[in-house]
Amino acid sequence: MSGNFTIPKFKLPDFVANLGQKLPQWPHALALVAGLNAALKMKLLPECELALLEDKLFRVRVLDTGGEACYTYLNGLFRPVFRPEREPDLAFAANLSAYLQLLARQEDPDTLFFNRELEITGDTELGLIVKNMLDAVEWPKFSTRLPLFRH
């Protein structure tokens, strides 16, 4: 077996999303924000562009799990938003497999978007900023610890 692991394209059964939508969503926001703040602390995110995210509202939906997380970037930290009072400035929606493929750098956001596997709505310019930030993250720093990120 080679050291590479390929994440297949998959969609969880509909009942998972139906159940997931009925569950509290705040744990998703806390987990996502914790990961983003850890990336900040490890200096994985390009600091020069972080100011452009200030006070913007983001939403990430995982369609086939029924999960949703809203968050913002304020005063140098990502923060969960449990009850958004406005539409997000930028929103992402995809199945779990697409997000995993993005994280593993198996697929890039453009390919997923053009294949209609990743929906991006909202401020186009903000979307490009976020995409460029993700592209700038140097995932190989993780490769010694997380098998998912090995190439």
Image (cartoon, rainbow, N blue to C red):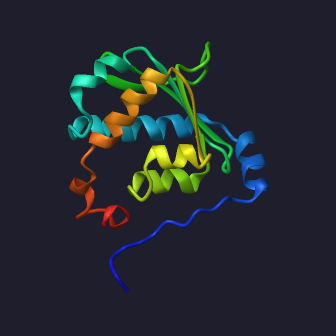
Q: Quadrant of residue 67?
A: top right
User: What residue is at 45 percent from the left and 55 percent from the top?
Assistant: 107
User: What residue is at 77 percent from the left and 54 percent from the top?
Assistant: 14
Percent x, y for residue 64? 68, 50
Q: Which quadrant is home to the N terminus?
A: bottom left
Q: Which quadrant is home to the C terminus?
A: bottom left
User: What residue is at 20 percent from the left and 37 percent from the top?
Assistant: 43
Of all residues, the one furthest to the front in this rendering is: 114
Is 48 on the left-hand or right-hand side of 28?
left
User: What residue is at 58 percent from the left and 62 percent from the top?
Assistant: 9
**Which residue is more in the foreground, 59 or 35?**
59
Percent x, y for residue 98? 54, 52
Percent x, y for residue 122? 56, 22
**Which residue is more in the foreground, 113 or 12?**
113
Percent x, y for residue 104? 39, 57
Task: Say if 7 sits above or below 133 in the image.
Answer: below
Task: Say if 146 sits above or below 87 in the image.
Answer: below
Is 62 on the left-hand or right-hand side of 38?
right
Task: Say if 132 sits above or below 15 in the image.
Answer: above
Is 15 on the left-hand or right-hand side of 131?
right
Q: Count all numbered tags in the image, as a single digit.
A: 0
